[in-house]
Image (tube, grey):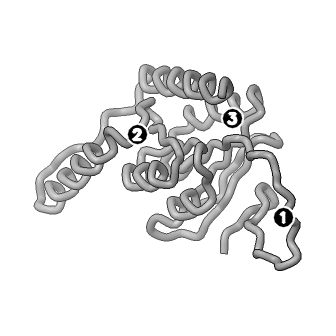
Amino acid sequence: MVNYGGKINPPASGDAGADVTPQPPAAMQIWVDADACPSVIKEILFRVADRLQIVVVLVANKLLRVPPSRFIKAVQVPSGFDVADREIVRLLRAGDLVITADIPLAADVLEKGGKALNPRGEFYTNDNIQQHLTMRNFMDELRGSGVETGGPAAFSQSDRHLFASQLDQFLQKSRMR
């Protein structure tokens, strides 16, 4: 069972008598794969949500504290492998932005028509996702065979700046459409 904690409306159950009046297209939302997202990136997103009045939804398998705002929501999912990822893919709409360092999740987001930005400021695209997946799988094979590959570099101030810059450019273009 997904805990929406009163922060986001659960999906409709498909009532036969539901109102089917055409609605204007919903505004783009930002979804955050929040379990591993750096706090500094969440803080940037919180400021953007209020400043631009864009809904930011953090999805995690643990309870998250978010600032009081009608634009910032948290969804807690049960623990388990890729449960948060599957919930993000299920709820996102074409054109939504997902913040994630999870390459398979980014591939699913792109397949569904969303956009994916990692916390270091790199957009995953249809042109580069296969390369990222191939490298990820290669590194997994190396680690599986006992090779010490190390981890990613420490998150830096330049990563933070690049993320903020890429996010700002994306949102400016999105608002012009």
Q: Nearer the viewer, residue 149 or 29?
A: 29
| Nearest to viewer (mark 2 / mark 1) | 1
Q: Is residue 29 above or below residue 171?
A: below
Up-down: is 66 above or below 53? Answer: below
Query: Would residue 104 appear left or right of 10 to someone viewing this image?
Result: left
Residue of label 2: 124
* Marks 2 and 1, how far apart at CA: 35 Å
The total of numbered circles placed on residues is: 3
Q: Do labels 2 and 3 touch, CB within 8 Å?
A: no
Q: Nearer the viewer, mark 3 or mark 1?
A: 1
Q: Residue at x 60, y 24 (%)?
A: 173
Residue 160: image location, x then y, percent: 49, 25
Q: Is residue 165 left or right of residue 30?
A: left
Q: Tell me whether the residue at label 2 lies in contact with that at label 1, contact meaning CB atoms closer than 8 angstroms.
A: no
Q: Earlier in the sequence, mark 3 or mark 1?
A: 1
Quadrant where the image shows the C terminus: top right
Label 2 crowding class (10 Å Cα cut-off): few <14, some 14-19, many 20+?
A: many
**What residue does disc 3 label?**
46
Say which amino acid is labelled 1. Answer: Val
